[in-house]
Amino acid sequence: MSKVLIVGGGAAGMFASIFAAKNGNEVHVFEKNEKLGKKLFITGKGRCNVTNACDVDELFQNMVSNEKFMYSSFYGFTNQDVMDFFENAGLRLKTERGNRVFPQSDHSSDVIRTLELEMKRNGVHIHLYSNVEKVVVEDGRFSYLVMADGSKEEGDACIIATGGVSYQTTGSTGDGYRFAEAMGHKITEPAPSLVPMNVREEYIPALMGLSLRNVQATVYDGKKELYSDFGEMLFTHFGVSGPLIISASAYVGKILQKKHELKLVIDLKPALSEEQLDARVLREFDANHNKQFKNAVTGLFPAKLLPVMIHLSGIDPEKKVNVITKEERMNFVHLIKHFTVTLTGLRDFKEAIITRGGVKVKEVNPSTMESKLVQGLYFAGEVLDLDALTGGFNLQIAWSTAYAAGSNIW
């Protein structure tokens, strides 16, 4: 029987503690906050998207960084295993659009409560308001923790599950990176991911609050396409957000931070080809042939978008549609299919759902999550250089890596 010390009482820390305890170990979880699972509480807008019910192979397709590293742990503890774990522990689940799995109650607090009950059932010792200052290694293996009050906690193994640096108010302040670096681990520089983006155009604040459904969003670096998908997005006072944009940030964030500018091209009518859209615009013009341009195209756009589209079209808003030239009309059609704005940067960690970067996975055993540099030291969850798209995939990383770490300590 080993004494296992877990730093961090979030999703990965709680989960790892349960499986380490099931192995007959004496397990202690040290959480700096007044309660466990603070970040888990706000995930999925407070509903907690616990995993995704896709085929296991699809988990890898939704990984953004280091998907090969996850091969062993995803298959070692699959999304189905996660669902079975929660159901067996008494939490009823439901699957929604995009295979997203939520608690039936729609309350993330029920997920946290279920994990806490399992921890207590398995004899895990929970230490709240317990800030770890240092993780100490002696002769190449983990030795003890130094707490903020100067006291020591000795143990046989340590799991670092401190999260990243997104949502810092929940306690994710990058401690794990500091601990890992002090023990010789390399860190891929943390950056915000799954985050809204800033836009340069001065008319963007006028579109604040406008949500666009069923649009195609494509991000370009010059002529090179970096990302393209179909779905929903939202305009904000600073730029763009919503599911399409949040997902795009995971792919283009790194380049945007280097280049400082990328083009976002929005197809407002992706179901129509340019020819079909031209025919549609012509019908609008024919039906309103004596009206001014500004009054003839009201049926094509949401009210907030209308003045912006009229302005960008270059067509005089007072012009009667029956004197609009074919060239003007074709330019207008092109604008609807290629509404273009300039992305100038990512929002910061305060608005990021997750952190990209972290402990380099080359220095971690993918089957057990044990450090290759320090014996008895393990990592789980967001502290590792692993990230995925939205839809329950990042929490699946937390559960699978935590299971690998917790269940491999004897």
Image: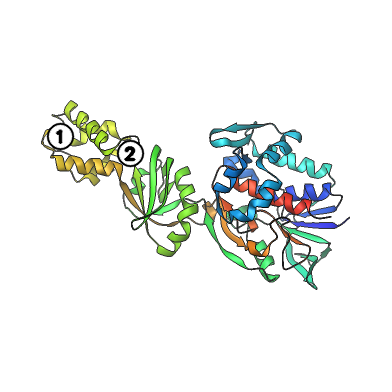
In this view, the residue farthest toward the right is 1
Q: Residues within 10 Å of mark 1 (few under 14, many from 20)?
A: many
Residue 112: image quadrant is top right
Relative to 406, is 289 on the left or the right? Answer: left
In this view, the residue farthest toward the left is 323
Residue occupying the point 82% across, 43% down: 120
* Closer to the camera in the image, 11 or 302: 11
Relative to 123, is 114 on the left or the right? Answer: left
Which part of the image, by quadrant, shows the C terminus?
Answer: bottom right
**Position of residue 298 measured from the top left corner of the image (x, y, whole percent):** 26, 32
Q: Amino acid at mark 1?
A: Val
* Closer to the camera in the image, 135 or 170: 135
Relative to 89, is 188 on the left or the right? Answer: left
Above or below, comparing residue 258 to residue 320 in the picture: below
* Closer to the camera in the image, 269 or 116: 269
Question: Mark 2 = which residue?
Answer: 304
**Position of residue 27 measured from the top left corner of the image (x, y, whole percent):** 82, 53
Relative to 95, is 116 on the left or the right? Answer: right
Give the numbered dot on residue 230.
none
Which comes sooner in the sequence, label 2 or label 1? 2
Question: Mark 1 = which residue?
Answer: 321
Q: How many marks?
A: 2
Q: Nearer the viewer, mark 2 or mark 1?
A: 1
Q: Amino acid at mark 2?
A: Lys
Q: Residues within 10 Å of mark 2 (few under 14, many from 20)?
A: few
